[in-house]
């Protein structure tokens, strides 16, 4: 977490989609087809956003007003708003409309420097609508130059008109088999938290998912110390996400595991929740990833540079720690750290060339000043004006 290799006055060679070499200026190849002068800018890997819910329809600006007037996220959910509100809207939206609306968000994120995005279902809450969301994510994967991973989050909230037991059975007996059969999900997720799904529910769903070979990435400890971290670790989750509410026991549970603790400072910011204790995790020897949680209810922004800034300003991470958390570690937390997340020969050329700046610190410090000069995805320059 505390180091990142840097090379001053350097060159980097892209061959088709991949980084094929880099080095110090005197050794720059002279036979490249084209050259881009980075001038006084930095060349850094694109951001990886390992936790989003960006496939949704409509907005929840009414609940934004409720929050301003004093209601909490849980109180809004208890009144039948929140996730159920987004689900009602999604039921009346066609797959094409949902795709168009979601692609607009994806394009915005690419312009802001993100090159890999994990996207969850979870606003369907009925088999056909969960499948609709996952098919939209598949279409995004095929039509966007970014790396896209899909997560099945049927267990986001209990569907209207059902008991929790009925709904968990529906997830296990109907949704999961169809999702697996159509190969629509890379990961499975459960919102294991107070007022949503218990550790027992989580255990049942993740055990069922294991039979299809789908690895978990779970929501845990956003609203309460939920036992979700330990459940994730038991099921070899790739990541456990949120972690606003954690004790030393959760930190211990994560030791010597392959599970990446992932914190989502954008939702702490928007909901006024405590920030994750990233510094203590790092002190205990753990890696930490940061992601946006982009969704209409708790984090209506997918700006990873702002996430990095919150990591520094609110969580007191150093710029280098925050940088590692939004690149290589978040790439790991979505299963793509062998392909992207660092400047490494053989990795996909997902790179940002920044505006002139003296150090990495400028990125979170001047947290609103545009900093991207070029964004290159899979070796291709992304048009920045769209
Ligand atoms: O990660 N916590 C659960 N899910 C989302 C919020 C989704 C919503 O409110 O629409 C989150 O914060
Ligand atoms: Fe989330």
Image: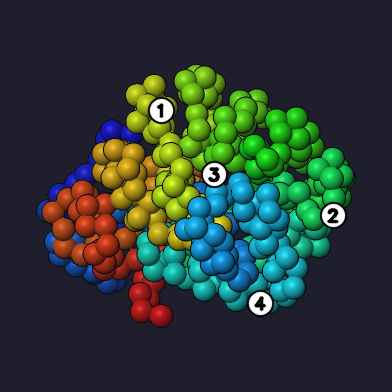
Q: Are marks 4 and 3 in contact (CB under 8 Å)?
A: no
Real-space Cα distance between discs 1 and 3?
21 Å
Classed neighbour count for the residue bearing mark 2: other residues with Cα under 10 Å, few (<14), some (14–19), many (≥20):
few
List the residue tagged with mark 1.
281
Classed neighbour count for the residue bearing mark 4: other residues with Cα under 10 Å, few (<14), some (14–19), many (≥20):
some
Real-space Cα distance between discs 1 and 2?
40 Å
List the residue tagged with mark 3.
335
List the residue tagged with mark 2.
161
Residue 351 placement: quadrant:
bottom left
Q: Nearer the viewer, residue 162 or 115?
A: 162
Q: Position of residue 131 (x, y in %)?
A: 76, 60
Q: Is residue 116 visible?
A: no
Q: Which comes before the other along the chain, label 4 or label 3? A: 4
Q: Which quarter shows the C terminus?
A: bottom left
Q: Helix, strand, or loop for circle 3? A: loop
Q: Is residue 174 left or right of residue 97?
A: right
Real-space Cα distance between discs 4 and 3?
29 Å
């Amino acid at each position: 977490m505390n180091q990142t290799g840097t090379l001053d006055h350097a060159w980097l060679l892209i061959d088709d989609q991949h980084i094929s070499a880099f080095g110090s200026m005197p050794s720059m190849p002279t036979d490249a087809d084209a050259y881009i002068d980075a001038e006084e800018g930095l060349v850094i890997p694109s951001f990886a956003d390992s936790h989003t819910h960006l496939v949704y329809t409509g907005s929840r600006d009414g609940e934004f007003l409720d929050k301003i007037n004093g209601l909490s996220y849980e109180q809004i959910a208890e009144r039948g708003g929140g996730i159920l509100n987004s689900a009602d809207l999604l039921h009346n939206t066609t797959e094409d409309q949902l795709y168009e609306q979601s692609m607009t968000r994806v394009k915005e994120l690419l312009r802001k420097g993100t090159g890999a995005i994990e996207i969850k279902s979870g606003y369907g809450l009925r088999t056909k609508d969960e499948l609709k969301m996952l098919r939209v994510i598949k279409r995004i994967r095929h039509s966007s130059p970014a790396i896209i991973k899909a997560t099945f989050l049927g267990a986001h909230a209990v569907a209207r008109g059902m008991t929790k037991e009925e709904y968990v059975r529906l997830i296990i007996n109907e949704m999961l088999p169809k999702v697996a059969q159509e190969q629509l999900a890379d990961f499975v997720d459960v919102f294991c938290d107070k007022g949503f799904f218990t550790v027992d529910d989580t255990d049942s769903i993740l055990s069922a998912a294991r039979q299809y070979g789908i690895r978990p990435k779970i929501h845990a400890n956003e609203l309460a110390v939920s036992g979700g971290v330990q459940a994730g670790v038991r099921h070899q989750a790739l990541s456990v996400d949120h972690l606003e509410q954690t004790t030393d026991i959760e930190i211990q549970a994560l030791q010597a595991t392959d599970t990446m603790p992932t914190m989502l400072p954008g939702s702490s910011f928007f909901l006024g929740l405590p920030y994750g204790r990233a510094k203590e995790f790092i002190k205990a020897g753990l890696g930490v990833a940061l992601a946006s949680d982009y969704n209409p209810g708790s984090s209506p922004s997918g700006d990873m540079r702002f996430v990095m800034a919150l990591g520094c300003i609110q969580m007191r991470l150093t710029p280098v720690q925050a940088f590692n958390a939004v690149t290589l570690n978040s790439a790991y937390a979505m299963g793509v750290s062998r392909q992207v997340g660092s400047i490494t020969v053989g990795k996909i050329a997902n790179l940002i060339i920044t505006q002139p700046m003296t150090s990495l610190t400028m990125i979170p410090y001047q947290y609103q000043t545009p900093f991207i000069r070029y964004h290159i995805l899979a070796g291709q320059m992304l048009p920045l004006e769209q």
